[in-house]
Image (tube, helix red, strand yellow):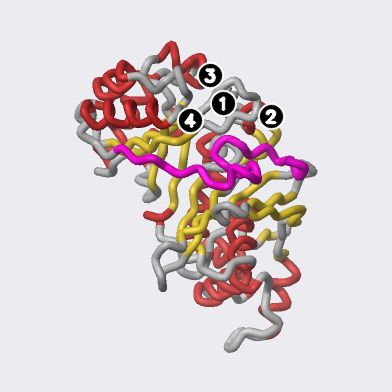
Amino acid sequence: MTILLKNHTSAELHEALADAGVTERTARRLQAAVCRQGGIPATMPEVPARVLAEVRRRASVPHLARLAKACAPRDGFVKYLFRGAGPDPFEAVRIPLLHRPGDEKYVVCVSSQVGCAMGCVFCATGRMGFVRDLAAWEIVDQVVQVQADSEHPVRGVVFMGMGEPLLNYEAVMRAARILCEPCGMAISAKAITVSTAGIVPGIRRLTAERQPYRLAVSLASADPECRRGLMPVEATHSTANLMAALREYHAASGRRVTLAWPMLAGVNTSEAEARRLAALTRGLPVRVDLIDVNDATGRFRPPNAAELNAFRDALRRCLAAPVVRRYSGGVDIQAGCGMLAGDATR
């Protein structure tokens, strides 16, 4: 079976190619060449030509096809449309962090699936339904290609694009390991965030395996009945079970959990919601990220300034936790949170 480079860690490459004469050091150098230069080099110092020839015979370097690219004139977010091993396209977004002179960098919002089975009513990806899982190399190559197209380094990755990452657990964790490797993309594990709609078995597996990545959970409401209407995952993984899993995660890792809160005017931005959230998270260190909903159907809209400020003030009164207004950029090119739908015409 052909070995797909960018689909394995350097340790896995060494194990698979050791009988061809590939040492651990050579495996790391191969990984670096593939991730940073796009392919297997013609020659490598201290590596016999016969070894490289055998690597080429047994391995291949897959690449995503880039179908389209759009840059938001207002804020510089860039959306990429890719096609991988299947016919259906998917998207990634380059997020600019250019406010510190001398430390300009990007974060890449990657997709882990084509479509999504979660069916969150405020999300364009959720309305697509599930199409397929992406392979680890298809996730890694989103970052590789964005970096190749960028003037500043990619220093962070968020699994917040299309799909539910914890329903494609193996590929997501493998991709994250490759992205972290010094010979891969050398992105710190602390700068990789895995976001979930609340897949409790996946959170418990993250905890048991002591994965080093940050965890973000989309909550939307602290009222289970309200949440069920917004996020059908509530019917399978209840708020009570979700919070129990998050408390276990914090106890094992010591990390604060980020709760993503898409703000829906008149739905989940009341003082009563703030009080419910405070009661739900009491004793659990959290950070609440407030995000404007982006709903092309018009069913939901973000709160106006008065409603937003009142909700944020209520949260700050009730919660002993950071409350942050998270900017959802790229809205003018359909690249904002909840807007990705793999459509080149949008």
Q: Is mark 1 on a helix, strand or loop?
A: loop
The mark found on residue 122 in the picture is 1
Image: magenta residue range: 323-346
List the residue tagged with mark 2.
128
- Judging depth in this view, the residue of 316 and 122 nearest the camera is 316
Q: Residue at x 32, y 31 (%)?
A: 312
Q: Are marks 1 and 3 in contact (CB under 8 Å)?
A: no
Of callouts 2 and 4, which one flags the residue occurring earlier in the amino acid sequence? 2
Left or right? Give the position of 146 relative to 56: left
Residue 243 position by quadrant: top left
- Judging depth in this view, the residue of 124 and 99 nearest the camera is 99
List the residue tagged with mark 4.
197
User: Magenta span has 337?
Assistant: yes
Please say if 17 is above or below 263.
below
Left or right? Give the position of 215 relative to 232: left
Of callouts 1 and 4, which one flags the residue occurring earlier in the amino acid sequence? 1
Mark 2 surroundings: few (<14), some (14-19) or many (≥20) residues within 10 A? some
Q: Residue at x 60, y 51 (%)?
A: 139
Q: Distance between the residues labelled 2 and 4?
A: 16 Å
The three-letter code of the residue at mark 1 reads Phe
The three-letter code of the residue at mark 2 reads Met
Q: Distance between the residues labelled 1 and 2?
A: 12 Å
**Looking at the picture, how far across and down is residue 22, in whole percent?**
59, 74
Mark 3 surroundings: few (<14), some (14-19) or many (≥20) residues within 10 A? some
Q: Distance between the residues labelled 1 and 3?
A: 11 Å
The three-letter code of the residue at mark 3 reads Pro
**Looking at the picture, how far across and down is residue 37, in whole percent?**
63, 74
Q: Distance between the residues labelled 1 and 4?
A: 12 Å
